[in-house]
């Protein structure tokens, strides 16, 4: 019975995502637990603030907004992992879900650091080109 419920859950999740709902709306529709979701979003916001500060983004607001968009995937991943863990489908249990969430934020940080480095390189090239023209 639990496996059937899990398959239905996964089916609806996939259907909702493919029909254009973002990850947060999918979780809200399935869990109906706004307090859990609120907690996960606060955690995401804290991670994004840390990432923004560590990378030293010049436009912190825009950078944080983009991070939060990407962090929705981390929130959805953790919530799905927790649901699977409750049904005994995750080896390593809760710690495994925590590891997946932390890996997700680590990936965001690495991607954003690369983006920042590319932008800085482009700005440096533009400055050099302007100096060469003068």
Image (cartoon, rainbow, N blue to C red):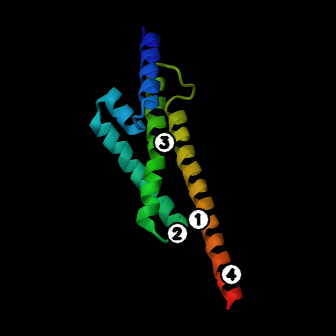
User: Which label's residue is closer to the chain start, 2 or 3?
Assistant: 2
| Figure check: 43 above or below 99 | below
Left of 81 or right of it: where is 129? right
Query: Residue 74, which numbered label?
Result: 3
Where is mark 4, residue-wise?
129
Quadrant in the picture for the N terminus: top left
Where is mark 1, residue-wise?
116
* Closer to us: 8 or 79: 8
User: Which label's residue is closer to the chain start, 1 or 3?
Assistant: 3
User: Which label's residue is closer to the chain start, 3 or 4?
Assistant: 3
Q: Bin the neighbour count of mark 4 within 10 Å (Cα to Cα): few under 14, some 14-19, many 20 and up.
A: few
Query: Residue 56, which numbered label?
Result: 2
Is disc 1 placed on a helix, strand or loop?
helix
Provide residue 61's location: percent of width, then percent of height. Answer: 40, 64
Q: Residue furthest bottom?
A: 134
Distance from the alpha carbon under mark 2 to that under mark 3:
22 Å
Q: Residue furthest right?
A: 132
On the question of residue 49 being in view, the answer is no
Q: Residue at x 47, y 25 (%)?
A: 14
Mark 3 against mark 4, which lies toward the viewer? 4
Q: Residue at x 28, y 37 (%)?
A: 34
Q: Bin the neighbour count of mark 2 within 10 Å (Cα to Cα): few under 14, some 14-19, many 20 and up.
A: few
Quadrant in the picture for the C terminus: bottom right
Distance from the alpha carbon under mark 2 to that under mark 1:
9 Å
Is disc 2 placed on a helix, strand or loop?
loop
Distance from the alpha carbon under mark 1 to that under mark 4:
20 Å
User: Which label's residue is closer to the chain start, 2 or 1?
Assistant: 2
User: Which label's residue is closer to the chain start, 1 or 4?
Assistant: 1
């Amino acid at each position: 019975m639990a496996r059937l419920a899990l398959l239905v859950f996964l089916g609806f999740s996939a259907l909702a995502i493919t029909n254009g709902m973002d990850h947060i709306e999918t979780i809200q529709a399935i869990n109906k637990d706004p307090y859990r979701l609120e907690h996960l979003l606060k955690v995401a916001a804290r991670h994004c603030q840390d990432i923004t500060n560590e990378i030293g983004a010049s436009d912190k607001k825009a950078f944080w907004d983009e991070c939060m968009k990407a962090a929705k995937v981390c929130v959805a991943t953790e919530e799905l992992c927790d649901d699977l863990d409750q049904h005994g489908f995750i080896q390593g249990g809760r710690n495994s879900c925590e590891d997946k969430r932390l890996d997700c934020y680590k990936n965001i940080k690495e991607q954003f650091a690369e983006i920042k480095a590319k932008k800085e390189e482009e700005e440096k090239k533009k400055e050099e080109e302007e100096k060469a023209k003068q």
